[in-house]
Every structure is written in structure tokens, then in C-alpha cells.
Image (cartoon, rainbow, N blue to C red):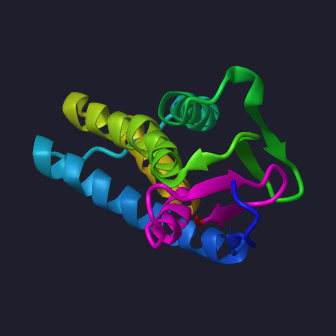
Amino acid sequence: MNNHQPIIIELNMQKIARDNIIWTIGLIIFTVLLNALIHQRFTAHFSWLDFIYLFLAYIVLIVSHETFHLLGFMIFGRVSYKDLDYGINIKLGVAYATTHQPLSNAAMKKALLLPFWTTGVTPTIIGLAIDNFLVVIVGALLMAGAIGDFYMYRELRKYPNDATVKDDPQQPKLYVYID
């Protein structure tokens, strides 16, 4: 990293929460209708057990989402395990995964989007393939849940791939250093 002042990318959590609700509703409607179109039928019967499974799958995939960020830091950014941190920020109401080691912009962008594909798109495709709209819904929830990652990704696209990016361990912020 150089000694220049960083460019700070900070997420507006209220805007993300609002957009998350909009995207969640939209993706659930879209994926459930897509499932009905693919399989030429629409069934919407839930049991209490289905809701419990949905909730448990959602929790497991949220943890997996953060785990895939950590794996992305290690795979794309060559970060060692000891430089990783994860947990839940009670004040912000979000799970987080971070690294204390700066990454290249290219590596950070890949690490940001890895969970979208693995915990959002993949379950949705599986749900569509096996005609299980509960799995489709969980996938839609996790795709919408990656909205903050997409906002950061969009901002990082403005800077060169070789820029250095440091993740803030406490806040939803990135510091970008350009040589």
C-alpha cells in the first residue's frame, strides 16, 4: 500500500435494506414463476415443517455465504487463514467476513461475488432442476442477500484491477489505494 489518502467506499445500509426487500420480493416471484413455467404446474402448499426447513436452510446458507467470502480471500487474494475474521455485527444486524490483509482490486471483486454464485444461483438452479420451489425460494433469498456485495463490486469497477483494497473490519467500508 502507498501513503496516499485512500478512496473510501461506504455502504448506505438503509438503502441496501430497502433494495434488499425489493430484490427479495422480485426474485422470489420471478424464480417461483420460472419454476412453474419450466414444470408446467404451480403448487404452493407449505407445512410448518417446510417453514422450519426453509429457515434452517437460510441460516446454513448465510453462514456459507460468509464462508465463501473467506474462501475467496484465500483463493483469489492468497490470504492466509490467520488473516481472516468473521462473525455477526449485532449493531448492523449483519453477518460479516473480512480479511486484515489488503487485496488487489481484481481479487476483492472475485471474493465479493463468489457467494452469490455458490449460495444463491446454485441452489436456485438445483431447485429449478428438481422442481422444489422451497429450494428455489432459498436461492432467491440468498441472491437478493448479496446486494451489498454487488454495491461494493459496482464501486470497485471504477478503479484499476491492480489498485489495493483494504476491508474495514468494523464497518461496511472499503479503502481503495491507487498507485
Q: Is residue 10 left or right of residue 30?
A: right
Q: Position of residue 76 (x, y in %)?
A: 48, 35
Per the rendered image, the range of residues in magenta is: 149-177
Q: Is residue 116 left or right of residue 130?
A: right
Residue ID at (58%, 35%)? 73
- Looking at this rendering, what residue extends furthest in the right direction? 91
Vertical comparison of 165 with 160: above or below: above
Q: Position of residue 47 (x, y in %)?
A: 51, 34
Vertical comparison of 91 with 13: above or below: above
Q: Quadrant of residue 4?
A: bottom right
Q: Quadrant of residue 127?
A: top left
Q: Position of residue 162 (x, y in %)?
A: 48, 55
Q: Position of residue 103 (x, y in %)?
A: 60, 45
Viewer-nearest residue: 105 or 31: 105
Viewer-nearest residue: 45 or 110: 110
Q: Is 107 a magenta residue?
A: no
Residue ID at (46%, 73%)? 158
Residue ID at (34%, 35%)? 122
Q: Is residue 158 left or right of residue 171?
A: left
Residue ID at (22%, 46%)? 35
